[in-house]
Image (cartoon, helix red, strand yellow):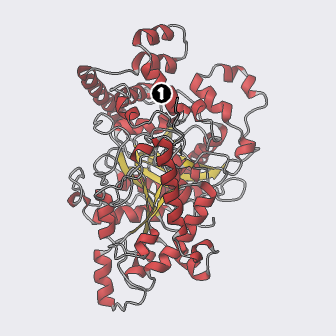
Amino acid sequence: MWFSLSPSPHRRDCQAKQQERQRQFDALPPSYNEACTEEDDKILDLSLSDLAHSHASASISTPAILQAYGKKVVAAQQASNCIAAVLIPDILHSNAPQLLLPATVDVDSSQSSLLEEKHLLSGIPVSIKDCIDIKGYDTTVGYSSRANKPVPSSAAIVRLLHDAGALTHVKTTVPPGLLNVDTSSDLFGRTSNPYNSEYSSGASTGGGGALLAQRGSMIEIATDIGGSARLPAHWCGVYGMKSSIGRFPSWGTVPPLPGLEGLETSCSPMARRLDDLEEFWKRVIAMKPWEYDHTCIPLSWRPVNLRGRKLRFGVLWDDGITPPTPACRRALQITVDALRRQGHDVIDITPPSILEGLMIAFQLAFSDGGVDFFNAVRKDERLDPVLTATKSLLSLPLFFKSLLARFTSDPVQYAMLTSVHAKSPSQERALVVAREEYRAKWREVWESNEWDFLVCAPHPSPAIPKGTAEKVTLVSCANMIIWNILDYTAGVLPITTVQSTLDALPPGFLNSPEYAAMGLVAKGVYGVYDASKMEGLPVGVEVVGRRLEEEKVLEGMRVVEEAVKANGMGKSGTNDVVGKNDSA
């Protein structure tokens, strides 16, 4: 009998993709492997608006920007393994539309003004999550079956960025199919946290989060169906805001569940500084994205200034599934105390059932029984245990799951066993009706309480140890997924870092009655929480507004950040993140 010794298509494509990535790094100029020069530092210190102005006026050349940021790309890859593809060599060695200005062009003041008006993002480095199409490059979505197959056209946001003069210099890593709390795949390997390589960088934009932790005014274009633009912001100490559907161009983005209208994926940017995030949003909207993407709402930028106003914040301390771990509760307490000291009304809230909304979301997401999601997975492709468990849950016969449900006292486990399975068309339509009824409940509660914003922990834990996603599970992301099912705008900003003493669990907590009373999901989260090992990891808070309130939520994030700074929370031992984002 003959046995083939050749690698499987999965292994072959993974190897080819990794070799391609290495060739792209090898094609970078040798200077990219050197330390930053004084000139590099000056470029990295510029805000987004200053960098765009300097590039449009030819004060700084494209090669100079790419060198400064290219060095950060190399450093980030070595530290975190966050890069899926490097586009810099092609920008440098071609007449790509991104290369707007050569190093020695002369531009007078009138020309400079015209260039800035046309090229609003001139010279701005923008990393692209590897589920967004760039012509001539793969869009793998983390699957080997999609590797080594360059796409024929660019996504709407990429075309807009190029017309605006931005430099799409890299693509960032994603897990297979995007649905996970960790970024790991056979195709790219594991992406680690930039603050501690033994910890996760976050959900499917983990690569972007790890890259943004490097210095500079770079932007990451992320996607978000359940927290992927926010969990990496929380775990990597950067800023991310999920927009409502239709506000940001998303056509040409491959979602984890194509065609799913009951729970849609938004395309949203992330940044290292709040000023840069807001400025990027303004400039993208000024480019009229609805002229690039038929799914975009033609809605111009609406400036909001809330400073000096007394605002009303609702506080969601607990989602009813997993109470925040001490570090995350402290971050939320810091925020609440700071807002109150600035004279704002801050009220504890009891919202509509989070579990109800979460189950609607999960049922809609897997209404086809997971067929579409798992079809792209090859036979020998390794899946994270979270996805393996999801596949097992979906494949069990309904009568057997109903039988198992009789023997559990855990409400989340019961709901998953009895609810998450393939749906008929009429059942799926009934879920859409349930979603709208759930949204109506929230609208009534919001309006009756006259909240300006809600604040909560984005996730109950700081970054989790690598390889523990199975214990933490997707259900732990309830405080992010819920805003997707409601289509609310939600942004995350860094507040503090884990402190080993302040944030430690009480001695013997894992053997206490309090722990024993927790549900399975909460036990999983608390079982991997260790403040002494997590010391120094970033911790954020989430600021939530209503649908299509992107301008207001960005302003709300600023109100929170300024309140925390004014309250002296930026001092060592309390907060090593807010106000110090340019030091790393």
Give left or right: position of 259 versus 365. Answer: left
Give the residue drawn at x 63%, y 52%.
Answer: 496
Q: Nearer the viewer, residue 73 or 481?
A: 73
Q: Nearer the viewer, residue 168 or 525?
A: 168
Give the residue drawn at x 48%, y 37%.
Answer: 479
Residue ranking furthest to the front: 1
Residue 213 image point, x, y percent: 57, 59
Of helix, strand and loop, which one carries label 1?
Answer: helix
Give the residue drawn at x 58%, y 52%.
Answer: 236
Question: Image height check: is 328 above or below 575?
Answer: above
Residue ranking furthest to the right: 507
Q: Nearer the viewer, residue 64 or 320?
A: 64
Q: Quadrant of residue 324?
A: top right
Total number of numbered discs in the rendering: 1
Give the residue drawn at x 57%, y 30%.
Answer: 322
Residue 181 image point, x, y percent: 53, 39
Give left or right: position of 129 versus 342. Answer: left
Q: What residue did someone put label 1 on?
A: 390
Quadrant where the C terminus sits is bottom right
| Residue 455 appears in view | no
Q: Crowdedness of circle 1 by 10 Å Cα count: few (<14), some, many (20+)? A: some
Residue 544 image point, x, y percent: 43, 45
Amino acid type at circle 1 is Thr
Give left or right: position of 418 versus 38. Answer: left
